[in-house]
Amino acid sequence: MARAVSADQVLFDECIEEFYYNQNGSESPKSPQDKCGYLLLDFSLKETIFTEHFSIEPSYEIILPGAYKAFISRVNLPMWAENSLDSHLFTLGLASVFSFATGRPVKAPRDGYISSRELSDDALSELAIKFPVLSAGPGAHHTSISRETLTKMSTNINEIVNLLYSLPYDKYKKFMQSIRLVHLGLNNKREDFGLGYYLLVSAIEPIATQAIKRKTVAIDNPELKKWRELAKKDPDIQKIIDAYQQELSKNRYISKRFVEFVLRYCPPEEWHYLEHPQENLAQVVKEMSPSTSIDWITSKRWFEIYPSDLGIDEIKTILSDVYTHRSKYTHEGSNPPHKTIYNTDRFFTTEYIDNESVGRDSSKLITLPKFELISFIAQRSISNYLKEVSQG
């Protein structure tokens, strides 16, 4: 049961419950005169995205001061989300799914009052200030998307929604919790890179520990058999063995399970599906001027590192380091070692860091996965495991 008054604050468990498919609800999107909700996007949506249960209409573009804009899309809600107090909970859940499926930051209103009013100029302004989008200058969002990008978005959204709705509620809830963490990671990247990075890795962890059992990565001590033979003659040795095994049982091998999960459900040979940072721009230019091609901007440059350039042991080390950086943020508040937030490299960035093992004045060059690659790995690995679970 949701709170009577949201008080401009989100309890996402309410959204998880409201977004879940109610089989007593309608099977088609609501008509325009019926109750609706809104999504706040970081790009201009030119065409309606249809799903079996709801639809997302083209966005209103609101001009804000400076180089900022807002993009507001109406959501035609399914029957089960039409309650005047709780309709915003559906769109908050949808915002997480939309963000997860598209890899873009998305927001939704934290209360349902706006959905019961006409979308006047005042109402548009009220929504616009909730998610101002930088549309020009350094760090600007790509607010124009190609038709190819839109098609991929629509396909991915439909696939994730259908997979989620195919699950019993308990399994659906676990996936929605991780999907929410991916969403929060994308939304917080600009506010705090370290927090966004931490949230992406944290999204993978609970699914990884569910999919990869501890015993599959636990290391057997080759000396244990010898110790047990000695323990047959010395009870004190048996006590030491018992204490050792009890302490060993506390090790959940989370880092190893994290790495194994990624290698199994988003292996490096699939990483090439991550779009180049300039891919959408190249597509937009080609659609506007078919005779003009700037495909060269998405080509690999001589200094770039691609997954195919790395051995499996190097990739395992990189993934293990990702989890280590996440743990240091959790326990020490220290950020990952990235110094470059944005560049046009596709997969990795390289940074010099202090090498404490050889002295303070020394440094070493390390390879770090870009935020976009970690986001892609989170989305793809969780989606692939979701498909496996949905198939029973």
Image (tube, grey):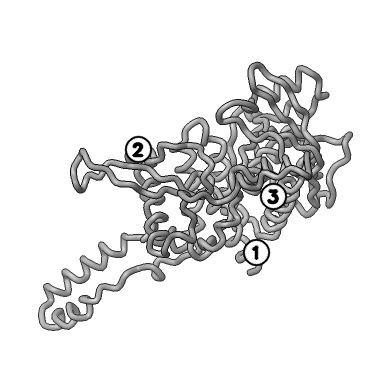
Where residue 197 appears, as percent x and y from the top left, is 47, 42
Specify the amino acid type for callout 1.
Ser
Specify the amino acid type for callout 3.
Tyr
Whether the residues at callouts 1 and 3 have beta carbons within 8 Å, the answer is no
Residue at 81% from the left image edge and 42% from the top image edge = 48
Whether the residues at callouts 3 and 2 have beta carbons within 8 Å, the answer is no
Q: 93 or 350, which lies in front?
A: 350
The residues tagged by marks 1 and 3 sit, at their Cα atoms, a distance apart of: 15 Å
Where residue 303 appears, as percent x and y from the top left, is 45, 49
Asked which quadrant contains residue 139, the reply is: top right
Kindly identify which numbered label has been placed on residue 334.
Answer: 2
Q: 345 or 231, which lies in front?
A: 345
* 1 or 2: tag closer to the N-terminus: 2
Check disc 1 and report the residue beneath it.
Answer: 390
In front of the other: label 1 or label 2? Answer: 2
- Vertically, is 346 above or below 221? above
| Quadrant of image for the C terminus | bottom right
- Vertically, is 343 above or below 302? above
Where residue 251 appears, as percent x and y from the top left, is 32, 60
Secondary-structure class at tag 3: loop
Residue at 73% from the left image edge and 36% from the top image edge = 87
Specify the amino acid type for callout 2.
Ser
Check disc 3 and report the residue beneath it.
Answer: 20
Q: Is residue 340 left or right of residue 48?
A: left
Where residue 231 appears, as percent x and y from the top left, is 15, 79
The residues tagged by marks 3 and 2 sit, at their Cα atoms, a distance apart of: 37 Å
* 1 or 3: tag closer to the N-terminus: 3
Q: Is residue 224 visible?
A: yes
Q: Is residue 66 left or right of residue 221?
A: right
Q: 91 or 102, which lies in front?
A: 102
